[in-house]
Image: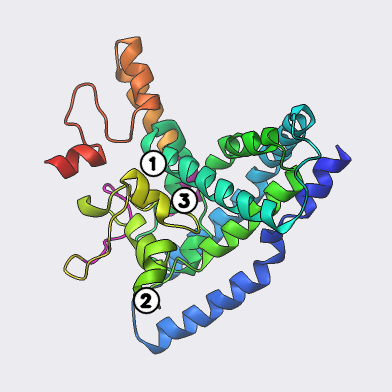
């Protein structure tokens, strides 16, 4: 237990909070001076309240997830072989980034996972405040995705540190202050332009660009979309949440999913409402993103 608590205290995200709020203050000043509509006061404070809720919800799953990592690490045949040498950190960076891509893509393609992630996409504004509006329910199922890295032989402390670095990097992606960077950067790395696409409700942009630090996984696995000037990104959901009540923002999709499960008569359809992508229906139009794009 002491090892788990020590690793939890080593989470760099909490230590980065002064940077987060400092950058947020600078962006607010930029938005005010440029007379843009990047912020809306009620929406912003909803994001802040969701952030506080996420911090508390995260404690239990994070403790259990790190405990699972230690259990897997104890069973690893490579335990002790992988140390803190730089080349192991480089390998861990790529493995962590691929793991995040898998987890994040799953959040958009499995409705049970989407129900925990949707709050992050619920804002119709795109700013650094939105970055702090994390998926609340997703914390419950997040950490087991990283357990295989411990089974490979990476110490849980290394895994949590890399997770933290990845999340810190993703923070600055939530801004319209930058358009695009030189092509080599845009080709390899996730950038604000790529992540704006990810937050778009345009059919072209739905469920695209799931990467964390790198965008190469999206290019390799067919989930990449370029931001094009001819089609500005419309932020939010295909059917926006018409409330700023924190509990409904955080957990409302679970209730909607449960209503769909109850109205389905066959058990196979009930299960499909849980495991298929958002938008699937047993008795209505198929509104999944891939189906909409084909249409």
Q: Quadrant of the C terminus?
A: top left
Spatial CA distance of label 3 from label 2 is 40 Å
> What span is in magenta?
232-251
Q: Can residue 125 be seen?
A: no
Q: Is residue 24 above or below residue 199?
A: below
**Residue furthest out toward the top:** 266
Per the image, label 3 sits on a secondary structure element best described as: loop
Residue depth check, mark 2 versus mark 1: number of the one nearer the observer: 2
The image shows residue 45 at horizontal and vertical percentages of 51, 64
Apparent side of residue 20 relative to residue 184 in the rendered image (left or right): right
Apparent side of residue 207 relative to residue 8 in the rendered image (left or right): left
- For disc 1, the neighbor class at 10 Å (few under 14, some 14 to 19, many from 20) is many
Q: Quadrant of the N terminus?
A: top right
Any mark on residue 182, and which? 2
| Nearer to the camera, 160 or 33 | 160
Q: Can residue 71 be seen?
A: yes
Q: Is residue 215 above or below residue 159?
A: below
Any mark on residue 245, and which? 3
| Nearer to the camera, 257 or 75 | 75
Residue under pointer 1 = 108
């Amino acid at each position: 237990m002491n090892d788990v608590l020590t690793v939890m205290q080593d989470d760099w995200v909490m230590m980065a909070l002064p940077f987060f709020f400092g950058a947020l203050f600078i962006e607010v000043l930029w938005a005010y001076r440029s007379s843009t509509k990047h912020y809306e006061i009620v929406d912003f404070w909803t994001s802040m309240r969701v952030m506080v809720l996420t911090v508390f919800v995260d404690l239990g799953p994070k403790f259990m997830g790190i405990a699972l990592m230690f259990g897997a690490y104890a069973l690893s045949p490579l335990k002790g072989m992988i140390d803190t040498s730089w080349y192991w950190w480089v390998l861990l960076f790529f493995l962590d980034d691929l793991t995040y891509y898998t987890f994040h893509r799953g959040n958009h393609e499995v409705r049970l996972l989407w129900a925990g992630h949707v709050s992050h996409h619920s804002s119709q504004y795109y700013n650094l405040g939105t970055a702090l509006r994390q998926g609340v329910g997703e914390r419950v199922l997040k950490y087991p995705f990283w357990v295989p890295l411990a089974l490979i032989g990476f110490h849980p402390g290394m895994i949590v540190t890399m997770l933290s670095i990845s999340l810190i990097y993703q923070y600055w992606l939530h801004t319209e202050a930058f358009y695009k960077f030189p092509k080599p950067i845009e080709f390899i790395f996730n950038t604000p332009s790529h992540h704006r696409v990810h937050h778009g409700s345009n059919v072209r942009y739905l469920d695209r660009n799931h990467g964390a630090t790198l965008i190469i996984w999206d290019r390799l696995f067919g989930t990449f979309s370029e931001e094009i000037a001819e089609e500005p990104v419309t932020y939010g959901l295909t059917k926006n949440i018409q409330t700023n009540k924190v509990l409904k923002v955080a957990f409302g999709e679970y209730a909607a999913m449960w209503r769909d499960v109850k109205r389905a008569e066959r058990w196979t359809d009930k299960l499909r409402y849980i495991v298929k992508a958002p938008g699937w229906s047993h008795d209505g139009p198929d509104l999944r993103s891939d189906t909409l794009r084909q249409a």
